[in-house]
Image: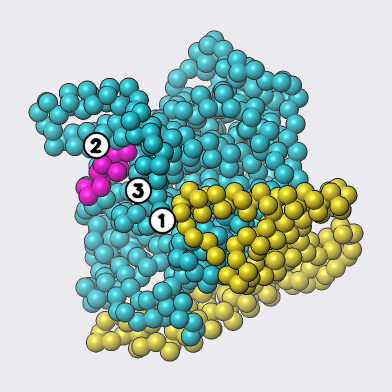
Amino acid sequence: MNTEKRVIKPNSNLIEGLLIFIGTTVYFLKALELQQPFQDGQPGPAFYPLCLAAALYICSIVLIIKGMCLKEIKNETVKTRNFPFKKTLIAIILTSIYLWVFLRIGFWISTILYGTMIAFVMEYGKRKIYMTIILSALIGIIVSGAVYVLFGTMLGVKLP
Amino acid sequence: MEQCWGLNCLEFPIKYLFSVVIDCVLNKKGVKKRKMLTQILHGFQILFTLNIFIYLIGGLLMGIFFGSVPGLTATLAIALLLPFTFTMKTIPALVTIMGIYAGGIFGGCLTAITINIPGAPASTMTMIEGYEMMKKGKGASAIGHAAIASGIGGMIGALILMFVAPQMMKVALAFKSPERFSLIVVALIMVATVTRGSLLKGIISTLIGLAIATIGLDPLIPTPRFHFGIPYLMRGVGLLPAVTGLFAISELLRQMEFKQWDIKLAQKIKISDFIPSWSEIKKIGPFLYLKSAVIGNFVGILPGGGASMAAFMAYGEAKRSSRYPEKFGTGIPEGIIAAESANNAMCGGALVPLLSLGIPGDAVTAIIFGVLLIQGMIPGPQLIVEHSGLIGTMFAALFTAQMLIPLVTFLLTPVYLRITNLNRGLIFSFIAVIALVGTYVAEFSAFQMGLAVVMGVLAYFMQRAGYPIVPVLMGFILGPYLELFFRRSLTLGKGVAIFFTSPISAVLLLLAGLFLYILGVKRPHLEENNSKS
């Protein structure tokens, strides 16, 4: 997983600048859909967001210019790990699935499965696979039980 | 909840001691002038009721645990507590938070000293001396020095808070909309410039936080903004999804990249090993504790100051004024004392602008700001007047939590060091579930859970790209106020001139510019030159 290979590092300033520029444009266009910035000589709901959009545009342009000026980075080759945030991506997917099933299948099953899967991803590769599965399942049950005691029993909240 | 403890009848004798003191205070003339003092004494009286005191101990233990585990912080602990505060009564909520705050700042030193990994960023300076002492076989003594210094520094910080906050409140009454706007600008600029990384990225983070805060209803005219056709977004992004997303979910995602830490103690530790010898304390003298605490407290008052900067400045000053500066870095208790005394004294300082001006200076106080709002209290000049009883209890809780740090350390450090080596899968599964379920139960809305995940993913990728997260939270929390005061001032003053015709506002904006120049433009050049040389 940690095999080192040579890849070209993208110019992060340029990419970030462009992403912020695009995001700001969406924000700016939505702000324009609001009422006029000034109404009866007083600043309206669109005024402040437009000021923010202007500031964000300036920052994104500065980032883009910085990215374009640092040309040497474009051709630089660096050693990096092969996709270091694979586990993170799995965690994002698992969390999204948990949100989707939480109300549908209820607290207990969804939380035990989610807790187990998160623990499995974190513990993966540290011991034999069957041991990891057993440990993760135990963690899932313990975590679900503890959270139920905190919210369901102590605070009296009704969980789905 | 208090009822179910069934402990109302059990009260500490200390409570009665305070009632005697209060009677003495009230029986003398000038009661009005001593109103705050009376409220603080009442606060102690309430605090030493067993069913309240238990929250302080719980918070303190939780804070030390979160502070000592690398990757977990006091901010995260308070963020996870946030959903519970919806159902908790005000005093238990505030008392627990004060315990977490004090414990969380101190807890970082345990792993900093024992395994050379600071549990919290504030303990980085402690690590320099502490780990060297650990290697010499004086680890327990280093922890003992850190605990005593944290306790003394924290108590001094809390005392300064008790005296300064009411005075600052009087000053704050002179602040109207333009002055408040300028003050928020100063706070945001300081947080953006002081946080690690480039100035530009700090400013962008702040602007992103401010932009997120504009989602929902306009603060002056009831017009929904930026809801993208989603009815749930018309109410805006809630504090809870924002805080849990920014600190809990993003941390879970970040920790997925790291391997298990391993804490092993070389030898068995006895309680007596933690207690430094009297001759050693005498040699160091009380001045170092006091000086470092005052520095830490002052740094805490400045928006964006934070515990790390407090420790760094106090350590630097201790080294500068030492008779043997060359020994710093080789494992001497003076370095630990300076850093720990300052970072715990910072807690009291950071609460001053929050309680008197309504301006949080760092992530923890920003979340406390949210807790106060949840409890129906608006931080600002009127807070101490309207809720003096609650604030008095809060002050008492902070002071007592700091006082208890050495005792808890001496008794429980060996246990803590074992707990911090708990399975990471267990810790982070628990954090993920409690953050998500906590967000759900606050409003019984799965949409809020989704928002927390979106905020967490955003924060994770921002952190990866070097964008600090604290300015996002500060922008998010202060955004509505910034807009409100900005637009109100423009309406009242018929233009931007009002920000410069008001002397306080003009001075504050000048300060903001100065900070921007010194911390954002000048400092990187100095650091670059230093690193070259």
Q: Which secondary structure is most common in the magenta stretch?
A: helix
Tag 1: amino acid: Phe
Q: Would you say residue B334 is visible in this rendering?
A: no
- Is B366 left or right of B484, judged from the image as shown? right
Say the numbered circle drawn on residue B86: 1
Which label sits in the foreground, 3 or 2? 3
Q: Which residues are magenta?
A: B384-393
Mark 3: few/some/many CA within 10 Å (<14, 14-19, 20+):
some
Asked if the residues shown at circle 2 and circle 1 are in contact, with their CB atoms under 8 angstroms apart, the answer is no
Q: Secondary structure at mark 3?
A: helix
Whole-number angstrom distance, CA of label 1 to CA of label 3: 9 Å
Say the numbered circle drawn on residue B440: none
Mark 1: few/some/many CA within 10 Å (<14, 14-19, 20+):
some
Q: Which residue is mark 3?
A: B90
Whole-number angstrom distance, CA of label 3 to CA of label 2: 16 Å
Whole-number angstrom distance, CA of label 2 to CA of label 1: 25 Å
Q: Chain of mark 1?
A: B
Say which chain is yellow. A
Q: Chain of mark 3?
A: B
* The image quarter in which residue B475 lies: bottom left
Quadrant in which the C terminus of chain B appears: top right
Tag 3: amino acid: Thr
Mark 2: few/some/many CA within 10 Å (<14, 14-19, 20+):
many
User: Image point 70% across, 69% down: which residue?
Assistant: A93
Magenta span includes B392: yes
Q: Secondary structure at mark 2?
A: helix
- Is B163 left or right of B73, judged from the image as shown? left
Q: Chain of mark 2?
A: B
Q: Are marks 1 and 3 on the same chain?
A: yes
Say the numbered circle drawn on residue B39: 2
Q: Is residue B235 above or below residue B386?
A: below
